[in-house]
């Protein structure tokens, strides 16, 4: 039996690491959640300042927020996969503090690095999510549920549908990694309600 060459072994380790930290998917489309319904009107609500940052102390996640809209195929945009520590908020839905679900998206990994929501699956009921706003105010949410669902069964209505109060959703990829498609098979979704 021959021993593997050191260079070959190092190359195999590098390839394996690349598969694990390849990002949520090979393309923006792979990383987007299911198509969002038509945005609910929020103009009549009490105005709140635009969200600019997110802090999730329980998983040591901190990021500025970039606004996200819809792709041409009507799926929700995601932050650039080559900037895995950047989170974004869905600007066509409710802003944090308004009635409705405010949606924040981030990568589990990307560009061969851990992403802003690498540890999102570790969150538990009662954890806090703090959204900083442009005017210096903050909206703090308490986590009510953490869910893992297959991307093909994405709960569009539960995530983007109408709510009685101000809520938040944090979304990333998760579950098994499909090396052939360069994509995770599931989504991790965190649900929370605004502290009053």
Image (tube, grey):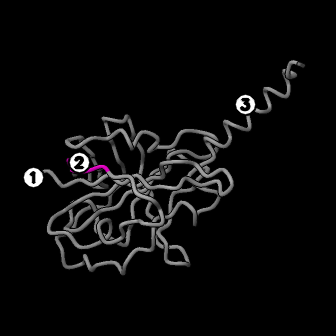
Query: Mark 2 and mark 1: span between their CA atoms?
Result: 14 Å
Mark 3 and mark 2: Cα distance apart in space: 37 Å
- The magenta segment: 141-146
Front one among 185 and 166: 185
Q: Residues within 10 Å of mark 1 (few under 14, many from 20)?
A: few
Mark toward the viewer: 3 or 2: 3
* SS label for mark 1: loop
Residue at 50% in and 64% down? 32
Depth order, front residue of 132/69: 69
Residue 158 place in picture, x, y as percent: 29, 67
Q: Residue at x 33, y 52 (%)?
A: 147
Dividing the picture into quadrants, the one containing residue 7 is top right
- Secondary structure type for disc 3: helix
Residue under pointer 1: 196
Taken as a whole, is the magenta stretch helix, strand or loop? strand
Q: Quadrant of the N terminus?
A: top right
**Residue 143, which numbered label?**
2
Task: Name which quarter of the figure residue 55 lies in.
Answer: top left
Q: Nearer the viewer, residue 15 or 192?
A: 15
Whole-percent x, y for residue 36 in the image: 40, 74
Q: Position of residue 139 (x, y in %)?
A: 22, 52
Alpha carbon distance from label 1 to label 3: 49 Å
Q: Which mark is first along the chain, 2 or 3? A: 3
Counting residues from the start of the chain, the first of labels 2 and 1 encountered is 2
Q: Which residue is mark 3?
A: 13
């Amino acid at each position: 039996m021959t021993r593997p060459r050191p260079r070959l072994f190092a190359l195999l380790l590098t390839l394996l690491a690349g598969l694990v930290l390849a990002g949520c998917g090979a393309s923006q489309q792979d990383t987007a959640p299911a198509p969002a319904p038509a945005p609910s009107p929020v103009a009549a609500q009490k105005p709140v300042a635009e969200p600019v940052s997110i802090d999730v102390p329980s998983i040591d996640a901190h990021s500025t927020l970039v606004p996200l809209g819809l792709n041409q195929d009507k799926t929700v945009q995601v932050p650039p996969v080559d900037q895995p520590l950047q989170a974004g908020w869905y600007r066509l839905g409710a802003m944090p503090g308004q009635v409705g679900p405010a949606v924040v998206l981030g990568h589990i990994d990307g560009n061969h690095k851990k992403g802003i929501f690498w540890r999102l699956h570790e969150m538990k009921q009662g954890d806090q999510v703090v959204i900083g706003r442009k005017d210096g105010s903050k909206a703090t949410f308490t986590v009510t549920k953490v869910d893992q669902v297959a991307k093909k069964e994405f709960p569009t209505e539960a995530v983007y549908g109408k709510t009685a109060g101000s809520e938040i959703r944090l979304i990333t990829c998760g579950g098994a990694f499909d090396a052939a498609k360069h994509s995770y098979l599931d989504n991790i979704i965190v649900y929370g309600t605004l502290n009053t």
